[in-house]
Image (cartoon, helix red, strand yellow):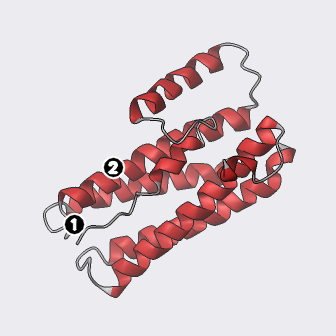
Amino acid sequence: MKHKIISMAAPLTLLLGGCSTNEKVEEVKASNSEVEKEEQGDSGESKYETSFRELVADMSKTMNKVDEIIKQDDTLYEVQEEFEKAVMDVRGVVREFKELSPDSKYDLQQKKIVRAMDELELATTKLMLGMDNTQGYTFQDGLAQYKKAIDLYVKAGYQIIDIRDGKELGTTEKG
């Protein structure tokens, strides 16, 4: 059985800067370097926008780690400790997303991000509880909820990009 738990992680990298769908992991790393450089100079980004981009990069990295572990052993029999640590790393990023203080123009979208993070927290709980039987209901329900949370997260992230770029909401998601 192959879980595609993070097959939706690719759209997460789009949130780093509204980049194209053909962007590769190397470009994500380059984007992270750009964030560091921008913080040193006057980038024109608000503290929220910068923090959001950094957290998106962190989330993408942690979710990719979870995906790698599942691909390594989809029963999780031999990698339970690694899986548990990776899931806890995801939860750490979730907590940071929930603590962000948005600029007023992002209030609604941040509430959507928090809702997605709540879903993700619940999903990771189910994944942890069900990791002894990856074919069982608890784990499978956790996967479904995980995917739902990612969808909510990506949609809210696209809206943040639209607001940042002065576009009509939904423009980035369609493109």
Please, is residue 105 above or below residue 34 in the view?
below
Q: Residue at x 52, y 42 (%)?
A: 21
Q: Residue furthest left?
A: 78
Q: Amino acid at mark 1?
A: Asp
Label 1 residue SS:
loop
Residue 156 falls in image quadrant: bottom right
Q: Residue at x 51, y 39 (%)?
A: 57
Q: Residue at x 48, y 42 (%)?
A: 58
In the image, taking residue 143 as reference, residue 171 lies left or right, namely: right
Q: Amino acid at mark 2?
A: Lys
Q: How many marks?
A: 2
* Residue hosting label 2: 65
Residue 35 falls in image quadrant: top right
User: Label 2: how many residues lie within 10 Å, few (<14), some (14-19) or many (20+)?
Assistant: many
Please, is residue 96 above or below residue 47 in the view?
below
Q: CA distance from mark 2 to mark 1?
A: 13 Å
Task: Evaluate whether residue 12 shows in this view.
Answer: yes
In this view, the residue in front, 82 or 34, is 34
Residue 107 percent location from the top left of the image:
81, 53
Residue 87 percent location from the top left of the image:
37, 59
Residue 131 falls in image quadrant: bottom left
Q: Residue furthest top?
A: 41
Q: Which mark is residue 136?
A: none
Residue 3 percent location from the top left of the image:
31, 67
In the image, taking residue 147 as reference, residue 86 lies left or right, namely: left
Q: Residue at x 46, y 29 (%)?
A: 27
Residue 104 percent location from the top left of the image:
86, 46
User: Label 1: how many residues lie within 10 Å, few (<14), some (14-19) or many (20+)?
Assistant: some
In this view, the residue in front, 36 or 170, is 170
* Residue hosting label 1: 74
